[in-house]
Amino acid sequence: MLEITHLSKRFGGLAAVNDVSTTIEAGKINAIIGPNGAGKTTFFNLLTKFLTPTHGSIVFNGHDITSEKPAQTARRGIVRSFQISAVFPHMTVLENVRAALQRNEGTSFHFWKAESTLHHLHARALELLAEVDLSDFANELTVSLPYGRKRALELATTLALEPELMLLDEPTQGMGHEDVDRVTQLIKKVSVGRTILMVEHNMNVVSSIADRITVLQRGAIIADGPYAEVAKNPLVIEAYMGSANTELQGAH
């Protein structure tokens, strides 16, 4: 689905992403891991066009998107969530999903229309809420949701845009154990028939749901493959410096 060839991004003398070539497989959960400063967020920003590469190419479904603007890339079906929760706090959970569904109808900014004109979107919105286990929260104000449920709502609004490729940036960051488990299972659930690329620090999450793992260090790929194979790679063990290696091996 996604072909990345010799991708590089330099900031002055720093190579944040350094000659990365890889592919993202359709229908799989692909994970990007690496120590702090490995270039993971920069890599994500290149894929979603928030940054322009210094060198290299990005091809999505046969189309070269290297020089496209973020909105063009989003219209092609690459949709991203961010580390910081991004929902409308003073709208209900249902209204948040309905607002995302409006994007597909081209009525996002029709503020003068009566709310009744949006009722035909309710059924689909409720289906999406059921998919992320939020049916019981449909009429609650989003501001009152626990953090983990807000991240689940973000999954629903992302799904509302009918993405071909979902990019999830640290989806379990800042969560307690119970929320991590819940959101991990939701990602696994919504991945059926979809393609996901996620940046994630939590090795238990990665080991339990990722089909393929790419490890970055200093902006370059040092390992790529199934978790069991990657966790035993000497370069990965060295990159995580002993204590984190224990986490790597223990997570499986």
Image (cartoon, grey):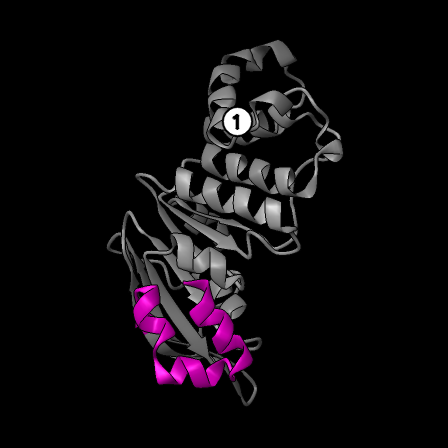
**Residue 1 falls in which quadrant of the image?**
bottom left
Pinpoint residue 11: horizontal percent, then vertical percent.
56, 81
The question of residue 58 being in magenta is answered with no
Residue at 51%, 83% in the rendered image: 242
Determine which residue is flagged by label 1: 129
Main SS, magenta region, reads helix
Which quadrant is the C terminus positioned in?
A: bottom left
Farthest residue, direction left: 62
Q: Is residue 2 above or below residue 110?
A: below
Camera sees residue 201: yes
Does 250 lie within the magenta span? yes
Position of residue 24 relative to residue 28, above or below, is below
Secondary element at tag 1: helix
Identified at 51% across, 61% down, the residue is: 200
| Side of 82 where 78 appears, left or right | left
Q: Position of residue 79 (x, y in %)?
A: 46, 47
In the rendered image, residue 73, in percent from the top left (x then y), is placed at 42, 51
Residue span colored magenta: 224-252
Height in image: 191 above or below 209?
above
Q: Residue at x 63, y 42 (%)?
A: 148
Image height check: is 108 above or below 222?
above
- Choose top left, top right, bottom left or bottom right for residue 66: bottom left
38 or 115: nearer the viewer: 38
In front here: 86 or 241?
241
Q: Residue at image x 36%, y 65%?
A: 213
